Image (cartoon, rainbow, N blue to C red):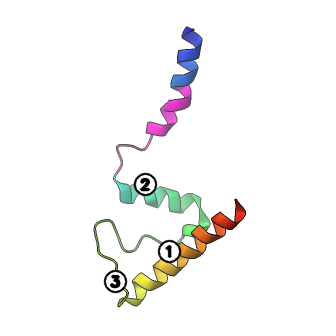
Amino acid sequence: MASDAAEKQQRVLPLFEYCALPTKTKFGLRVERDPKLRGLGILGRGRLFSTFRSDHLVEANKLAEVLLGKLRMI
């Protein structure tokens, strides 16, 4: 029984590896690992999206392409 608890702890521990980091930093780490997400994250947390800003629209289109591409793979 004790080995089961230790095994569960070892499986859960990696989930908390980045929990103390700010969201922007975590997203940056994700972008570094996934080349499809390069160039995303310019809007930043807490900022409002605007359809009148071309850089916001470009980022939204890239993100939609990445997400739709991942959905098609499933």
Q: Position of residue 26 (x, y in %)?
A: 43, 54
User: Could you tell which of marks 3 and 1 lies nearer the N-terminus?
Assistant: 1
The image quadrant that residue 37 belongs to is bottom right
Q: Amino acid at mark 3?
A: Ser
Q: Secondary structure at mark 3?
A: loop
User: Could you tell which of marks 2 and 1 lies nearer the N-terminus?
Assistant: 2
The answer for how far apart the CA atoms under marks 3 and 2 are is 24 Å
Q: Specify few, some or many for label 2: CA neighbours under 10 Å numbering under 14, 14-19, or 20 or more.
A: some
- Quarter in which the C terminus is drawn: bottom right
* Residue bearing mark 1: 39
Q: Nearer the viewer, mark 3 or mark 2?
A: 3
Residue 62 in magenta stretch? no
Q: Specify few, some or many for label 3: CA neighbours under 10 Å numbering under 14, 14-19, or 20 or more.
A: few
Q: Position of residue 63 (x, y in %)?
A: 52, 73
Q: Secondary structure at mark 2?
A: helix
Identify the residue at image location x=51%, y=36%. 14
The image quadrant that residue 6 belongs to is top right
The answer for how far apart the CA atoms under marks 3 and 1 are is 18 Å
Magenta span: 10-21
